[in-house]
Amino acid sequence: MGEVTTLYNQDFVGTMLREVIVIYATSDVETFPSGYKYRMHLGTVDGLELLRYDNSHSKTIGHEKHVATGHTKDVDFPGIEALLVEFWSEADQYWTADDVEPPRPYTND
């Protein structure tokens, strides 16, 4: 995978939900043209996947969004920060139901 630098790594567990986010910068732009390898996952503590953004198959498929129904769709890549904020925006709707506030390095002022 070339040179890899971990940019963000979070594993947060609430009452009913678990959020795992890992973002790497990589020099392997042949496999990951964006320069990033990432996985942003939200699921239940019992293992049900609710939401996931990833580029595990970046070279052949691209950037994907997976949802609880099992559907997968291609998504645009507006940049890693914008994609992370998009993920958090969707994930926060689930966290509201869990009555837990996961750590977010931004404020909604």
Image: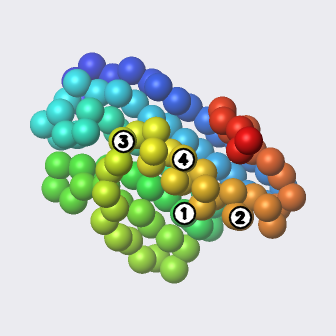
The tag earlier along the polypeptide, 1 or 3, is 1
**Farthest-out residue, left:** 30
Residue beneath disc 2:
94
Q: State the residue at coordinates (46%, 76%).
A: 70
**Picture coordinates of residue 103, whole percent (x, y):** 73, 38
Which three-letter amino acid code belongs to the residue tagged 3? Gly
Residue 2 rendering spot, x and y as whole percentages:
22, 24
> Which quarter of the rendering shows the N terminus?
top left
Name the residue located 45 percent from the left edge and 45 percent from the top edge: 82
Q: Amino acid at mark 2?
A: Tyr
As helix, strand or loop, the secondary structure at mark 2 comes to: helix
Question: For the residues marked 1 and 2, what is the alpha-carbon distance in whole angstroms?
Answer: 10 Å
The residue pinned by badge 3 equals 79
User: Residues under labels 3 and 4: Cα distance?
Assistant: 10 Å
Q: Farthest residue to the front: give it.
A: 109
Residue bearing the label numbered 4: 85
Query: Which one is in front in this view, the residue at disc 2 or the one at disc 3?
Result: 3
Mark nearest the camera among 1 and 4 is 4
Q: Is residue 6 left or right of residue 50?
A: left
Q: Residue furthest bottom?
A: 69
> Which disc is residue 51 wearing?
1
Q: Quadrant of the C terminus?
A: top right
In three-dimensional space, the C-alpha distance between marks 2 and 3, rounded to whole angstroms, equals 24 Å
Q: Secondary structure at mark 3?
A: loop
| Residue mark closest to the camera, 2 vs 4 | 4
Tell which circle, 1 or 4, labels the residue nearer the N-terminal end. Answer: 1
Point out residue 50 in the picture as x, y percentages from the top left corner.
59, 67
Disc on the earlier residue, 2 or 3: 3
Residue type at tag 4: Val
Which residue appears at 19% of the width and 40% of the height? Answer: 33
